[in-house]
Image: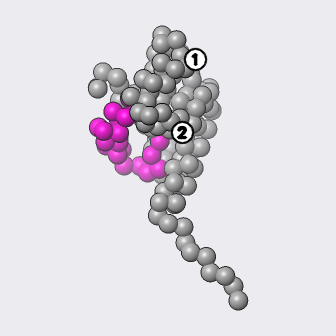
Amino acid sequence: MLARHAAPSHSARSHYAGLVAEECAARDYQRGGGHVRAARWRCPEGELDLVVELPSEIVFVEVKARRHGAETVTPRQWARIGAAASRYLAEHTDGTVPCRFDLALVDRSGRLERIENARSFDDW
């Protein structure tokens, strides 16, 4: 008799899709000359999906495993991302490096849409 396995839960599938999307986004930034300094960096203020170092700036990348546009990130989520980015900059840089916030939207087939400067510190 064959053992029956339960299908993965929705949250497990969503988590896995998020990890795959983050890997896809990381590869995209690396192909463009970026260095991934951190992935899923956590602090009390929140989590940063990717922190990418480019020659002239640090990029905080919010990754979404869907393609619905920038409105998929709520103002509350952006606030948490901004607070976490502030903490990251304080702990891991000298504070003089410019930064930006990008949004990477990845669909089920792995197509990526990168929205550079999706948000700025001035928006908070």
| Magenta stretch holds residue 55 | no
Residues 37 and 54: in front is: 37
Q: Mark 2 highlights which residue?
A: 40
Residues 57 and 44: in front is: 44
Q: Residue furthest bottom?
A: 1
**Secondary structure category for the residue under label 1:** loop
**Which residue range is magenta in the image?**
63-82
Front: mark 2 or 1: 2
From the image, which quarter does the N terminus lie in? bottom right
**In the displayed structure image, the side of residue 98 where residue 92 appears, left or right:** right
Query: Can residue 102 be seen here?
Result: no
Q: Any mark on residue 55, and which?
A: 1
Amino acid type, label 1: Pro
Q: Which residue does the image show at 38% across and 28% down from the upper left?
A: 83
Find residue 50 and report its horizontal and vertical position in percent.
53, 35
**Secondary structure category for the residue under label 2:** strand
- Marks 2 and 1, how far apart at CA: 21 Å
Find residue 84 and report its horizontal and vertical position in percent.
43, 30
Work out whether 115 lies above or below 21: above
Q: Residue furthest right?
A: 1
From the image, which quarter does the C terminus lie in? top left
Amino acid type, label 2: Arg
